[in-house]
Image: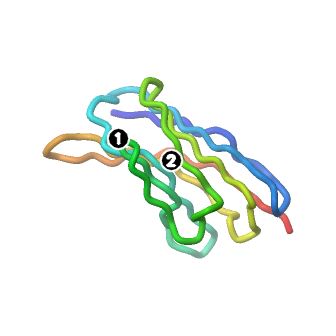
């Protein structure tokens, strides 16, 4: 099993910044990718950003140029630097991890609330 512990959410004004962190523990071998998804009330969960062990990144269209994902492989921790925040970024942000070789296993954190006021 893998445990994901998120931190860094909160309330910020539009135009401000926040940094999310997610630390993985437990069975952390063969991690393929880590990242973040978000879900706003009444909407489907959507990709924010993911990063592979080699450092390749993929961002959701709505956050490109504003958010930056990074990863510390030694600490099994992923970070999300969020700049120029907008009210539409308000959501619960979930940490995500995929591990495994032939069989892939997905894990989710319990979520951290990000609220951007206008």
In the image, is 89 to the left or to the right of 106?
right
Q: Which is more N-terminal, label 2 or label 1? A: 1
Q: Which mark is residue 95?
A: 2
Between 96 and 67, the one lying in front of the other is 67
Between 94 and 110, the one lying in front of the other is 94
Residue lying at 35% horizontally and 41% vertically, measured from the top left: 54
What quarter of the picture does the N terminus occupy? top left
Q: Secondary structure at mark 2?
A: strand
Q: Which mark is residue 30?
A: none
What residue did someone put label 1 on?
Answer: 54
Residue 17 image offset from top left, x and y in percent: 76, 51
Number of other residues with Cα within 10 Å of mark 1, as a class: few under 14, some 14 to 19, many 20 or more? few
Residue 64 image offset from top left, x and y in percent: 57, 64
Residue 31 image offset from top left, x and y in percent: 32, 37
Which image quadrant for residue 40? Answer: bottom right
What quarter of the picture does the C terminus occupy? bottom right
Q: CA distance from mark 1 to mark 2?
A: 18 Å
Vertical side of 78 occupied by 113: above or below: below
Residue at the left extreme, as displayed: 102
Residue lying at 75% horizontally and 67% vertically, measured from the top left: 86
Which image quadrant for residue 99? Answer: top left
Which image quadrant for residue 16? Answer: bottom right
Residue 7 image offset from top left, x and y in percent: 64, 38
Between 113 and 46, the one lying in front of the other is 46
In the image, is 84 to the left or to the right of 44?
right
Residue at the bottom extreme, as displayed: 42
Q: Secondary structure at mark 1?
A: loop
């Amino acid at each position: 099993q893998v445990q994901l512990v998120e931190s860094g959410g909160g309330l910020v004004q539009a135009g401000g910044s926040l940094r999310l962190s997610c630390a993985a523990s437990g069975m952390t071998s063969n991690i393929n990718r880590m990242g973040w998804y978000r879900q706003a009330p009444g909407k489907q969960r959507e990709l924010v950003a993911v990063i592979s062990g080699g450092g390749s990144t993929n961002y959701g269209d709505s956050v490109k140029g504003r958010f930056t994902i990074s990863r510390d492989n030694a600490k099994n921790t992923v970070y999300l630097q969020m700049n120029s925040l907008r009210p539409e970024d308000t959501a619960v942000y979930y940490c995500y991890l995929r591990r495994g070789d032939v069989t892939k296993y997905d894990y989710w954190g319990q979520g951290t609330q990000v609220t951007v006021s206008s």
